Structures are given as C-alpha cells and as structure tokens.
Image: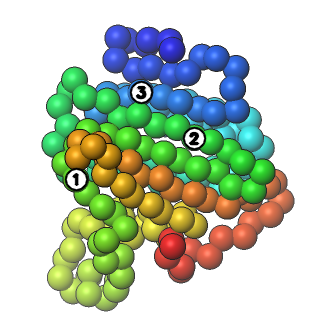
Amino acid sequence: MLNLFDHFEINTEKSDLLKMKIRPTLQDIEQALGRLHDFLKQLDLEEICAFDLETVFYEVTVNMILHGGLSRSDYIEFTAAPGPDQISLRFVDPGSPFDPTSHDSSFDPQVAIRTRQKHGFGLVMIKRLVDKLSYERVDNRLNVVTLEKNLCPQGVISHDYTKKAE
C-alpha cells in the first residue's frame, strides 16, 4: 500500500482490483473518487456506466460519514472488482449498524415536493443505479455493503433507471 498524506492508502500492486483505505473525510473521498475514475477509465466502460459507479461510490461513502458515527481515525475499506460482465463494489466500515437493503426505497417526487423533503434521496438513487445490493454485519462491529452493477461496454447503454436493485 502507498500512503498518501498519511491518511489515504491505495493498492499500488499491479492488479485487476482497486483497493483503497479511506479516512472518513470529504477531502479523502474526493481523492479516492479521482482514483476510482482513473480505474474505471482503464476498463473502457460506457461513460454513463462509469458515471453511475462514481455516483454510487460518492453516495455510499458520504452516507457512511454523515450517518455512521465514524471517527477521524477510522477507515472505510473499498474494493472494486471487475468481472467479465459486472463489477462489484465493496465497502467496509466500523460505523453504526445500517442495513440499506431493509429500508424502503420507494420514491414519490410529488410527495417529496409537497413535503419539501431535503434528505433521503441517496439510498433511492443508489438502489436504482446498481443491479444488486447486499449487506452484512460482521463480528457485530463492521458493516459490509456490496453492490454489483452489470457492465456496459463502449457503445452499449442498457440501464433502466426506474428499477430497484435486488
């Protein structure tokens, strides 16, 4: 691992995986997002597919910071593992238990406007941008969130933004 700024680490070994250890700060998340962008560019994905993955990464990590009760000494461990037809994004954090699969992701824009809803859109968006979402609590101290997205090779745009993840 290469240590950047004493708080942001990335896997520097030649690998098909991207592994990062990220401190829960917006600055570190932005740096990690840049590294994810470069990694996804190497996969030669359709631009909209890469954008979806970057959006999901940002939403998940920011939610971990805002709602997980993480301290500045904690880390979010992230792994991106591309396969032949899909990519898996795995997030591990020591924050408060939160199972995103158990929360209602229904969304009615009319109700949101009428009630002036300001929060709660991130999880809805995440579930619509990925094809599979899973959660487990490990050793009663770690949240493990795994998201899978079917890959869209260059020239193929095949995503239905109205559906929800399984």
Which of the 4 image quadrants contains residue 38?
top right
- According to the picture, the residue beneath numbered tag 3 turns out to be 21
Disc 3: CA contacts within 10 A as few (<14), some (14-19) or many (>=20): many
Q: Residue at x 27, y 67 (%)?
A: 120
Disc 1: CA contacts within 10 A as few (<14), some (14-19) or many (>=20): some
Of label 3 and label 1, which has the lower sequence position? 3
Which numbered disc covers residue 80? 2
Local secondary structure at mark 2: strand
Local secondary structure at mark 1: loop
Give the amino acid at mark 2: Ala
- According to the picture, the residue beneath numbered tag 1 turns out to be 97
Q: CA distance from mark 3 to mark 1?
A: 19 Å
Q: CA distance from mark 2 to mark 3?
A: 12 Å
Give the amino acid at mark 1: Pro
Q: Relative to 100, is 77 above or below? A: above
Residue sitting at the far right: 155
Q: Position of residue 64 (x, y in %)?
A: 28, 46
